[in-house]
Amino acid sequence: MSFVCYNVYDGSILSIMSLNPMTGDLSGNPVFEYEKSWGYIEVEYSQVEKLLDGTEHSVEYVVAYSQVNNEYELVRRQEFTSESLGISDLIFQVPILQHEDFVKYKKLGYQPDIHIIHDIPNTCWNIKFGDRADSHAHGQFLDLQKHLVFSITQYNNPNILYRILPIKLENLVYERYQVIPFMYDWEKSDEPVSIFTIKRFDTYAYQRIDNEKI
């Protein structure tokens, strides 16, 4: 068996070793000090043999989260394309989080991976990146230079587009939130809207704030 250490933010390969990086040698000494920014998986030697002998390069591979197997796997790097998604992921409607539920979940310590707040009192959209999102991010979404795109539409109708909110993933991951000011009058009105996106994380929530309560 071999162990692949990887960057948890982008899936890139940091190291391939024969020793468990956490338990290390027979004396139990770790190979190197643990940091939140990296993780590791155990793989068969045959999966990394070509990387170790130089036939292939580690930059061609990433550690990706498989929704099918519910675990992280070593896979060849590829662009995030529609072929790797189901229809429900391509046109995903962000579920609405009512204020009462938000208060209840907050007490329980629950936090969605992506929390989109329609903040009318402060005339802005606030997109928050949950603490659990680092480990729950879908592995095929690895390029931090890419953008998350949220489509604000007519209520329950993805065909009537009102506005697009693009968010650079790198900024969201490292700053933990992004604020986008309102541009249109309807954003401050009582008109209900829906939010659609490509589902790349496990949990999403759309919360509308109509008053000063948060």
Image (cartoon, rainbow, N blue to C red):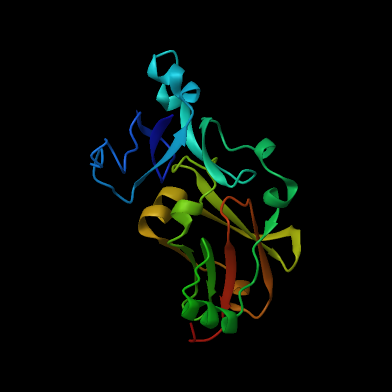
The quarter holding residue 159 reads bottom right
Q: Residue at x 55, y 40 (%)?
A: 140
Q: Is residue 42 above or below residue 93?
A: above
Q: Residue at x 54, y 82 (%)?
A: 104
Identity of the residue furthest to the bottom in this view = 212
Q: Split into 4 quadrants, where in the image is the N terminus?
A: top left
Residue 172, horizontal then vertical, whole percent: 43, 55
Q: Residue at x 47, y 32 (%)?
A: 43
Residue 1 versus residue 16: which sits nearer the camera? Answer: 1
Q: Residue at x 34, y 37 (%)?
A: 20
Residue 76, horizontal then vertical, whole percent: 53, 28
Q: Is residue 36 left or right of residue 84?
A: left
The count of marks equals: 0
Q: Is residue 115 left or right of residue 170?
A: right
Q: Is residue 191 above or below residue 64?
A: below
Residue 129 versus residue 25: which sits nearer the camera? Answer: 25
The quarter holding residue 4 reads top left
Q: Is residue 123 above or below residue 74?
A: below
Residue 143 versus residue 149: which sits nearer the camera? Answer: 143
Q: Is residue 156 left or right of residue 107?
A: right
Residue 60, horizontal then vertical, whole percent: 46, 25
Identity of the residue furthest to the front in this view = 26
Residue 22, horizontal then vertical, whole percent: 31, 43
